[in-house]
Image (tube, rainbow, N blue to C red):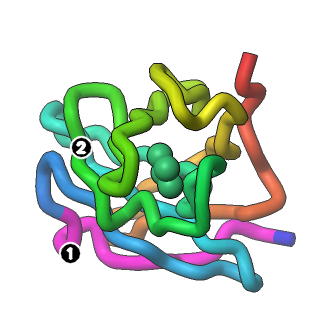
Amino acid sequence: MTAQRVCALSELEQDSAIRVEVDGVAIAVVMDSAGDVHAIGDTCTHGDISLAEGFVDGDSLECWAHGSAFSLSTGKPLNLPAYEPVPVFAVTIDGDDVLIDPAVTKPTS
Ligand code: FES
C-alpha cells in the first residue's frame, strides 16, 4: 500500500483536527500550534468517539466526551479514563498535499 492524499495542507488550521478515512481507517489529521502535521487513529479507545471533534492542546488531542488526551507523538493517552493508545501514522507533506499510508504506523512506546 502506498501513501494516499488525504487533504490539502491549506485545509488544515493550527490547533485543529479533521477526520479523514483511508481504506476504511478513520484518521484524525492534526495541525499543532507549531504548524506541524500529525495523524493518529480517530477513534477514542475509551468509546466510539471521533477524536477529531476534540481539542488540540500542544502535543495532544483531547477527547471531548470524558477528557482523555492522546499524545500526537506516541498515541498514548495522557490521562484516564482511556488507557489504550491509538495508532500514530507517518505523514508526508508533498507541496500542498498531505499524504498518509494507513499501513505505516509509528511505534507507540
Ligand atoms: S469516549 Fe473518549 S474519553 Fe471517553
Q: Which residue is drawn at 24% across and 43% down?
A: 56
Residue 43 position (above or below residue 88)? below
Between 56 and 106, the residue placed more toward the observer is 56
Using residue 63 as the reference point, say whether residue 58 is left or right of it: left
Q: Name the residue under label 1.
A: 11
Q: Which residue is drawn at 40% across and 34% down?
A: 69
Coordinates of residue 87 in the picture (x, y in percent): 69, 45
Q: In which quarter of the image is residue 9?
A: bottom left
Using residue 24 as the reference point, say whether residue 30 is left or right of it: left
Between 20 and 95, the residue placed more toward the observer is 20
Residue 1 position (above or below residue 90)? below
The boundaries of the magenta stretch are: 2-12
Q: Quadrant of residue 107?
A: top right
Q: Residue at x 82, y 59 (%)?
A: 103
Q: Name the residue under label 2.
A: 56
Amino acid type, callout 1: Glu
Q: Is mark 2 on a helix, strand or loop?
A: strand
Amino acid type, callout 2: Val
